[in-house]
Image: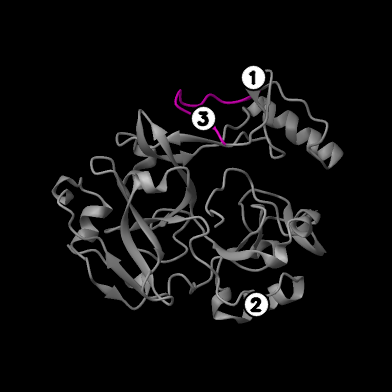
Amino acid sequence: MRRLGFVQQKIPCVFVTDVREEPSRKRQCQHFQVVATERMNPVALEANVDCSLATEKLDGTCCYVTLYKGQPFLWARLDRKPNKHAERRFKKHQHAHRSCHGFTWNVEEDFKTVPDAWIPAHKVKHVDGFPVPDEHGHIPGWVPVEKDNKQYCWHSSVVDYQVGQALVLGPSADDKDELEITAVSLADLQEQTLELIGTNINGNAYGLGSKKQPIHFLVSHGGICIRNPPPVEFQQLCSWFQKSPEGKVEGIVWHCPDGTLVKIHRHHLGLRWPEDDTCLGNTPVVVRVPENGTNDAHDNNMLAFFLALNGRRFSRLRDVQLEP
């Protein structure tokens, strides 16, 4: 069986894209918009996208589970970006050539420093021992989420290294129409990528928790399948996103038979995001975080709170509230 849930690089759009000189709907202060044309991306055609598995593209921040100091650890996405001087040179080149091709980086001098524990993402190219930036001028990478790092406090809230578990949202094993909140061993998540979603992530598109009592989960990439997805055709996708209740998602990621990933984002189609009501936020959910003999070791995090809700069902994910 093909293993899903491994996102280390930018995923290309399922359609060929075009750049328009208009304010971005997705990023503030970006004065251009990347839009999909109706022409299929050759990468998608070669990967046989019509035989792929369609999964929900989630609006959060990317994470990775791999070893750190000899134990499975949660890592946060941290792209190494150019310093101000190099960024100006890069943008000047892009504006003059309407392309990043032909620009030369000095990786030793052009990029901001990163923590000592930082590692480049898989498949990042190296030249003379140095990682090479992608077409956006970034070097994708990861940094371990340590408990004392306030920058990653919401990442820390969903893991407990003492018991080696993470709080994960995924499909219920008992009911295909229901989600499940559960504790998963970090060892079982090793070498997977996941999305962190919740109250304090990307404007909280799914309406989770509150300022007083924030709620966050990890969701394995490829973990939320789209039921009865539309054909991979421009007009039918536009219609599905606008008219179908299942279309109230940020986008779709297709997992092709050869492992290739391609995506479509609502902004590629000129559609608004976030929606007032999302498909994920309206899905019923059950909590299954049972005592296992080690729960008394839980720190004051999401796992400890959800232990008190074990067995509870909520009619919508957005209705989940933690016990005081």
Q: Is residue 176 highlighted in magenta?
A: no
Task: Determine if residue 320 is in view.
Answer: no
Q: Amino acid at mark 3?
A: Ile
Out of 266 and 98, give the one closest to the viewer. 266
Figure quadrant of residue 274: bottom right
What's the magenta region?
108-121
Out of 118 and 259, give the one closest to the viewer. 259
User: Which residue matches tag 1?
Assistant: 129
Q: Is residue 115 highlighted in magenta?
A: yes
Local crowd size for mark 3, using a 10 Å CA cut-off: few (<14), some (14–19), many (≥20):
many
Quadrant location of the N terminus in the rendered image = bottom right
Q: Amino acid at mark 1?
A: Gly
Q: Position of residue 153 (x, y in %)?
A: 34, 43
Marker disc for residue 119: 3
User: Which residue matches tag 2?
Assistant: 240
Which of marks 1 and 2 precedes in the sequence?
1
Task: Reply above or below: 286 against 191.
Answer: below
Q: CA distance from mark 2 to mark 3?
A: 39 Å
Query: In this rendering, which labeled residue sits more in front, label 2 or label 1?
Result: 1
